[in-house]
Every structure is written in structure tokens, then in C-alpha cells.
Image (cartoon, helix red, strand yellow):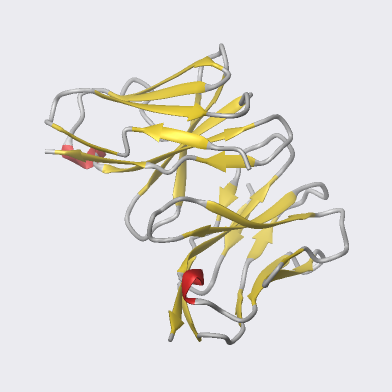
Amino acid sequence: GAVVSQHPSRVICKSGTSVKIECRSLDFQATTMFWYRQFPKQSLMLMATSNEGSKATYEQGVEKDKFLINHASLTLSTLTVTSAHPEDSSFYICSARIQADEQYFGPGTRLTVT
Amino acid sequence: AQTVTQSQPEMSVQEAETVTLSCTYDTSESDYYLFWYKQPPSRQMILVIRQEAYKQQNATENRFSVNFQKAAKSFSLKISDSQLGDAAMYFCAYRRPNEKLTFGTGTRLTIIP
């Protein structure tokens, strides 16, 4: 099956700094990538949808200036958490999809803001 | 808006027994897909099974099968011969073609040795 990687798997950063998470589709070109946030013992919450070369579409309530998403190529999307605060600590999951096909999920990134 | 409901926050089953996880959804569309995803402790989301709404035949993947009742908007997952490795969170999900996934709240499945 298709593989999606995320880097880093874990990151700890200080409050006020920014952190970037990369999501790559390793063996396919993804027309659409998705970023989710998951709190402990809860479901996945979609943050935004991005298509290569165009601006991301953010879900209601998600601050687009805080969570910057760049989908620079068909195999790479990045999520940058700007001026991170402890409440941004969470598990972030990316997902990639070939048009009209399955979504494939990355292994997730655990962000801890101290 | 579409909603997906999983009414069982937790379920447990004896090893080698069969367990059924429930899922209902609400939609006015006729063309859509339904999924069951497994999220083990590693938190990697794994697709368990997929069902196209236009197919009347229930999907099956080895020990995993679904009972798809389109009129009732019900999509339950049956796990036969439960194994310790089946312990995980299970999420039911709905998607229209080329649209985003809508997840249920999940069911935590515990396997009792």
C-alpha cells in the first residue's frame, strides 16, 4: 500500500517558538493532503485541506495564521505551528489522497510545548 | 452536514470470540463510501475495510466483515476470532467522492486473553 511519512515523530519546543512538521507521500503523488489534530482519547479533528500549488482550506475555528500549511509539491506538505503555546500540544496527523482514491495516513507527530 | 455516530465508547471481547462494533450515519446523499479504521496504541491509522454505498454486497477482509444497511444508515463491523492484536480504537468514517472524511467518535476495543 501507499506510504505516508511524517517528520519529526516527536518534537518538544519552548512556548513562543515555531515548529514545522513535514508530511511526505513516498510512493505516490498526492493531489490532496489533509492535516488532523487528535487529543487524547478523542477522534481526529480535521484542521485543513490542501491541494498542491493552492492555498489551504481551513476548517471553521482553526486559526490559519497560527497553523500555516504549505503544499509545495505533489509529495510534500508542511504544517508550521507559529508562536506555539502549551495549548497547542497535541498529536498531529497528516493524510494524503490520490484523486478519487483512498486516503493514506502518516504515523503522526506528537508536539509538546513547554 | 453528515454525521457519524458510534454509540459504544468501549467494548471488550474474549480472545477468539466475535464482536460487533456499531456505527450509524446521517446523509441525504446516495453516492458515498464508508470505512472502518483501526488506530492501535502506535496511533497509526490503518484502513480495516471499505464499503461503496452502491454495492449491496457487504465488504469482507479476512476476519473483518461489515453489515451495511443502507436504508437504516447502519454500518457495523464484525470481528471474528478476535486476536490480541485487534485491541485498538476503531473509527467509523463516511466520505463523499473527492470530499473530506467524517469520523465517528471511536470505540475502544479491549481483547481479554
Residue A80 location, quadrant: top left
Image coords of residue B83 (percent x, y)? 53, 77
Visible in this render: residue A110? yes
The residue depicted at 46 percent of the width and 80 percent of the height is B111
Image coords of residue B13 (percent x, y)? 51, 84
Q: Is residue A100 above or below residue B33?
A: above
Residue B91 location, quadrant: bottom right
The C terminus of chain B, quarter of image: bottom left
Looking at the image, residue B19 sits to the left or right of residue B55; the answer is left
Q: Which residue occupies the foreground of this view, A113 or B86?
A: B86
Image coords of residue B107 (percent x, y)? 49, 68
Q: Which residue occupies the foreground of this view, B73 or B18?
A: B18
Q: How many marks?
A: 0
Residue B58 location, quadrant: bottom right
The residue depicted at 41 percent of the width and 23 percent of the height is A78
The residue depicted at 63 percent of the width and 75 percent of the height is B79
The residue depicted at 45 percent of the width and 54 percent of the height is A43
Q: Is residue B21 above or below residue A100?
A: below
Looking at the image, residue A64 sits to the left or right of residue A19; the answer is right
Looking at the image, residue A111 sits to the left or right of residue A50; the answer is left
Visible in this render: residue A60? no
